[in-house]
Structure formats: C-alpha cells, structure tokens
C-alpha cells in the first residue's frame, strides 16, 4: 500500500517540534530573496510559483521581499495537496493565490496550457525539502523543462544526501535525529525525533516523519511521509538534461531545518 503524505497530521504538533518555525521561515525567505537578487538583474520577474507551499509563509514573505527590492507587483501562487494547509494559507495571506492540487498534476497542466504569466518571467520553487515527496518525479521535471520557467529553486534537508547513501547501501537500520524534548505538566518527558526508515511498499522510497517517545517508550506516531530516495545531485543532473544550469547555491535555516538550495536557470 502506498504511503501518502498528510501534513494535516503534523500541524497539531508543529509548534512543539519546531518552536522557532515562523522566525526561521522569515529568515529563509530573506536568504532566498538575497540569493535571487543578483540573478534577477535584467530579468523582470512577474510571478513566483511555490510547489508544495504548505501554509504559505515563504511564498508570501518572498513576494514581499522581491516587491520591496524593486521587482514591482509579483503574482504569488502556491500549490499543495494538503487541504488543511491550503485553508490556513488562504486565510493568512490574502494577497497570494493558493490551489489545492498535487504539484505533479499542476505542472503537467501548466506545460500543456500555460498560465497568465509567461515562463520567462516566472520563478518556480520547491522549498522546505518538498520535491522528494512528489510522485511522478520524472514527469514533473519533464513538465518544468517543457514549460521553461526562468528560474527553478530546489532545496533539500542538510544531510539528505547522507540519508540516501545510507539507505541505498547495505545498512537499512532506521535513522533518528532528536528534534525536541519536552516535559509535560505531569512530569512525563516526550521526545520527538525525525525518523527515516525503508518504505516496505516501495524500495525506491523511504518513510520519513516524526516519531514521539514518552519517557523512552514509543508513543503515538503522528506523521509519516514517503520520499523518493534520490540525492540532490540526481535532481541537478535531471534539470541539466532539461536545459538548466546551476546558477547559485543558497544555504538557510527554514522552519523544518537547515536547507541546501540550488537555484537553476535556463541555459
């Protein structure tokens, strides 16, 4: 059975697991804007599309950063398959447009029919380590190459390549990283870990999510997501085949952790 990613299950514990989420998202948007700025000289950006936008923070903040830097009016469009997250984004950021859709399906429709803004004035981004979650990865990358947006920004968790190496080798033991340890009012210690383990249904994917342990004993497992077991270099190679080159690397702390981002531009 295919494991589906349901971020609505993460929302109730997000503040506990990632207590600096909002501040880190603001810092990430600022870093992305600063990284984009030198590459946008002579290129009029009219639209930013965020595939896997979640609750919309980085998209809205980046739109404001680019507008204040002199890029003028920016259309911001967020796409996510999680209805609960899209509802939050629509309520918070009325200046942006949000669509509930799988990124792969959305990009395929764009490649076929286009949107109001032309590709040469558009930045497409998949940030917050979203692209490994997507299904039909090759089709999505093909759609990007066909539509040809001016820039594509992809990021991955710091350490993701080591995770891929671990699970493509002989060792398939789960990997756990403590994200937060809290004491409840009754004195119980709850530990949240970012856990990665093989996906028994699909050998080319892993299950990655948040586990909870109460005083060392496994507790409720609130959230899992299946992710494509490919390193960042594989994505860069596929983008290069689609007519893109690496324009810049950008590192930043986002709400979900330290990210390594790759800004790709048309050849």
Image: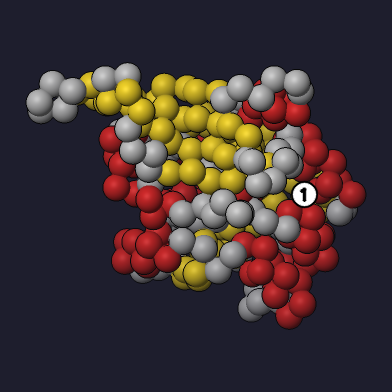
The number of discs equals 1
Q: Where is residue 91? Give x, y as percent.
A: 31, 66
Quadrant of image for the N terminus: bottom right
Could you tell me if residue 66 is visible in this image? no
- Image point (83%, 47%), residue name: 238
- Image-quadrant location for residue 207: top right
| Residue 7 or residue 188, whichever sits in front | 188
- Image point (50%, 70%), residue name: 99
Of all residues shown, which one is farthest toward the left? 186
- How is the rendered protein coloured? secondary structure
- Image point (43%, 36%), residue name: 210
| Residue 128 or residue 223, whichever sits in front | 223
From the viewer's perspective, tell me whether residue 54 is left or right of residue 240.
left
Could you tell me if residue 196 is visible in this image? yes
Q: Residues within 10 Å of mark 1 (few under 14, many from 20)?
A: many
Q: Where is residue 72? Give x, y as percent.
A: 53, 63
* Residue 44, above or below 23: below
- Which residue carries the number 1 mark? 265
From the viewer's perspective, tell me whether residue 186 is left or right of residue 127.
left
| Residue 5 or residue 257, whichever sits in front | 5
- Image point (42%, 27%), residue name: 193
- Image-quadrant location for residue 178: top left
Q: Secondary structure at mark 1?
A: strand
Q: Where is residue 163? Give x, y as percent.
A: 65, 26
């Amino acid at each position: 059975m295919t494991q589906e990613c349901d971020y609505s299950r993460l929302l109730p514990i997000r503040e506990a697991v990632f207590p600096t989420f909002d501040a880190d998202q603001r810092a990430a948007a600022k870093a992305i804007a600063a990284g984009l700025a030198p590459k946008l000289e002579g290129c009029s950006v009219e639209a930013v599309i965020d595939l896997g936008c979640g609750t919309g923070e980085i998209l809205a903040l980046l739109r404001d950063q680019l507008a204040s830097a002199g890029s003028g009016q920016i259309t911001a469009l967020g796409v996510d398959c999680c209805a609960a997250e899209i509802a939050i984004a629509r309520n918070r950021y009325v200046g942006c447009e949000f669509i509930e859709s799988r990124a792969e399906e959305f990009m395929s429709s764009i490649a076929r029919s286009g949107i109001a803004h032309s590709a040469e004035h558009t930045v497409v981004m998949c940030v917050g380590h979203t692209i490994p979650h997507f299904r039909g990865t090759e089709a999505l990358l093909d759609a990007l190459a066909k539509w040809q947006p001016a820039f594509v920004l992809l990021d991955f968790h710091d350490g993701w390549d080591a995770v891929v190496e671990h699970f493509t080798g002989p060792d398939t033991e789960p990997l756990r990283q403590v994200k937060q340890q809290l004491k409840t009012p009754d004195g119980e210690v709850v530990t949240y870990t970012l856990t990665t383990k093989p996906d028994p249904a699909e050998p080319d994917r892993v299950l990655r999510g948040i586990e909870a342990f109460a005083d060392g004993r496994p507790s409720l497992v609130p959230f899992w997501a299946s992710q494509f077991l490919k390193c960042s270099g594989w994505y860069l190679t596929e983008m290069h085949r689609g007519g893109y080159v690496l324009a810049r690397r950008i590192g930043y702390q986002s709400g979900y952790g330290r990210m390594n981002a790759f800004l790709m531009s048309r050849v």
